[in-house]
Amino acid sequence: MAQQQIELKRGLNGVYFDTTESSDVMPEGRLIYRGYDIHDLASKSTFEEVVYLMMHGALPTRWQLADFDAALKAARKLPPEVIDIIVKVKGAHPMDVLRTAISALSAFDGETETMGKDANIRKGIRLTAQTASIVAAHHRIRQGKPMLEPDPSLSHAGNFLYMLLGEKPDKDTAELMDRDFIVHLDHSSNASSFAARVTASTLADLHGCVVSGIATLKGPLHGGAAEGVMKMALEIGDVSNVESYLAKKHANRERIMGFGHRVYKAEDPRARHLRDGSALLAQKKGQPKWFQILSKVEEQMRPYAQRGICVNVDFWAGSVYYLLGIPEDLFIPIFAVARVPGYVVQVIEQQGRNVLIRPLVQYVGPHDQQYVPIDQRG
Amino acid sequence: MAQQQIELKRGLNGVYFDTTESSDVMPEGRLIYRGYDIHDLASKSTFEEVVYLMMHGALPTRWQLADFDAALKAARKLPPEVIDIIVKVKGAHPMDVLRTAISALSAFDGETETMGKDANIRKGIRLTAQTASIVAAHHRIRQGKPMLEPDPSLSHAGNFLYMLLGEKPDKDTAELMDRDFIVHLDHSSNASSFAARVTASTLADLHGCVVSGIATLKGPLHGGAAEGVMKMALEIGDVSNVESYLAKKHANRERIMGFGHRVYKAEDPRARHLRDGSALLAQKKGQPKWFQILSKVEEQMRPYAQRGICVNVDFWAGSVYYLLGIPEDLFIPIFAVARVPGYVVQVIEQQGRNVLIRPLVQYVGPHDQQYVPIDQRG
């Protein structure tokens, strides 16, 4: 049979698979959540408010927020069976542990098989809280440290830092983590949210969709850049080495981590919030070095900004986590803590007016191999 | 900002996202695995040979097959920690248990983080064996029955039936299960294989990709039709009720389960192999009723075949499993046992010449919501 003439869209680059009302990533350097500019939300709102906004479509009143926050807090404690499971797999990569534990939670959520927006919001609230608790619990367990009870006086971000690091964060630090979560919450059709939507489009349950998202986020082409930037900063070691480091990278035509974005052709609007946070922590921790190194890298790279290669969100995120004392292999899990409610929002949207996501793949192999019995194969 | 004119491809229907050499689903009713017709493979080959073919691109010699088979058999026993995890989540849907257990296996596979085709084949062989063992182990555990040791004298399919049902299958029955696995192994860009490829395209590890596939297969729009057909047969109850049942369905414009396919516009070439199997089992088990009912449904629906609405693979699969004494909630897990090596093959293909799979989604919400402080919201 003659090969048909087919238009290949490798990687589906530039193909629109649906419409969305959750977030808009605009090439000129704007990020919109349900109509609101990310700068307003990052500087004036809280993660809890923004999760509510994304799930319900409007910012909450004080009473709506109180109920929502109570539901989040009520879900912070993990079922003991899931803690046992985390103990069993504690030696795995934290993203594998998170994926396994979220998958296991389906056995203990009374609404796993209940479909529809309302049930998905309830499950999504629980999963948002539980994701933070899993990352924190696993880190304590693998260090041989006791797990900590959630503290209901702390915000989602503050409680996460407390359960992870064993120390109640000060107000600035909790707010920085809160801002980090806000800017990482949703980002249009990124690869992991798209994976969650593909899963959702078969009308699979929410836990499975979130598991797909987590599995996909782990890949170094998606969630891994913050780790790479911090490795670069450690490799540079001192601000006086920045120029020679970059010169060598340029000479070898190697990529500098934390620059450029598939959509943004100007500033990544999330970056400045973490830049401010990195500066704050540098001062607070008395470790100005990393901020100085990264600032110098940014400055040296400025000529590329005119060609649309700007600092992206990962550039500053790594130094923030590093200064908080968080090990590198938790950088992606922290991304996941912020992004899980984003998956929930996109799954609800997908199933709200669902169509199965099933593109085609072009077969380019032979069609007429003759079957040869095994003893005649050579 | 004015909305750009954008061509929406909802569900990516008709869009080609890449090329493949693994399988071709041809509208005229042919299914090709690496150049071989499915009818040759289903009638002349074994599941082990076909998995080898799919992974390596050529049918094995006897010696290659012996090594491959030894590797499969060596991986049948699950790590005790994974069995403990299955016990913890035993009350969940079998697909959730399978998803959790495969995710957990990443903690115990020495090559989880090793990338590349060779490592993926080794891990893929292990995952193929382990998937069958998980489904069987969970079913035994939830029934309170002792788990069974794998029997190295049995084929992959035969051993699966033995570990699941506690009885060594006769030759015909083992061969029928083997044929069922062969025809379900791969199927071009189905939703779950596509999900596995989306995950693979971030360069995530194989376990995560397979987990995405499993999560997606669970959805009733993908893996669930065999269950629906058997429910229909049970509802009909007797061959004399077929005509009135169908008349009522037609009058209410309801869909008849197990008919039609998004690509095949003629016979689904997989169906006949399970039709033969269903007939065989009906006779062997002395329960001709279900085969008679389904044959009558097929006969009554023949006029629709001219319009391209033919019996699909799910139509006969359900009755086969039912007659084997397998409960309905295991129909999709059995599909998974066959399809996991298909995911492995497509992941290897994706990562062999990778490009990130990241389509766009069109934002249709507002851009200029004014942020109002919480106490002024009403």
Image: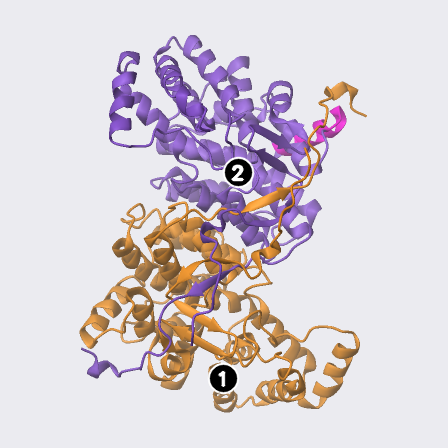
Chain colours: A orange, B purple
Residue type pointed to by label 2:
Leu
Among the 4 quarters of the image, the one containing residue B290: top left
| A126 left or right of B212 in image | left
Task: Tell me what residue is drawn at x 29 percent, y 17 percent.
Answer: B242
Q: Which residue is mark 2?
A: B78
Task: Tell me what residue is drawn at x 50 percent, y 79 percent.
Answer: A29
Residue type pointed to by label 1:
Arg
Residue B313 magenta:
no
| B89 left or right of A230 in image | left
Q: Which residue is mark 1?
A: A272
The residue carrying pointer 2 sits among few (fewer than 14), some (14 to 19) or many (20 or more) residues within 10 Å by Cα, namely some
**Residue B109 visible at all:** yes
Task: Give the SS element for disc 2.
Answer: loop
On-image quarter of the N terminus of chain A = top right
Q: Is residue A342 above or below residue A31?
A: above
Q: Is residue A188 above or below residue A373?
A: below
Select label 1 or label 2 by which is in front.
Answer: 1
Tell me the CA gap for discs 1 and 2. 48 Å
Residue B282 position in % (x across, y down):
41, 12
Pick the residue in front: B125 or B74: B125
| A210 left or right of B106 in image | left
Q: Chain of mark 2?
A: B
Mark 1 and mark 2 residues within 8 Å of each other at the beta carbon: no
Pick the residue in front: B289 or B341: B289
Residue B67 magenta:
yes
Q: Chain of mark 1?
A: A
Residue A133 position in % (x across, y down):
38, 63
Among the 4 quarters of the image, the one containing residue A250: bottom right
Q: In the rendered structure, which segment of residues is drawn in magenta?
A: B60-72
Residue A25 position in % (x across, y down):
47, 71
Among the 4 quarters of the image, the one containing residue B372: bottom left
Residue B8 position in % (x across, y down):
47, 57
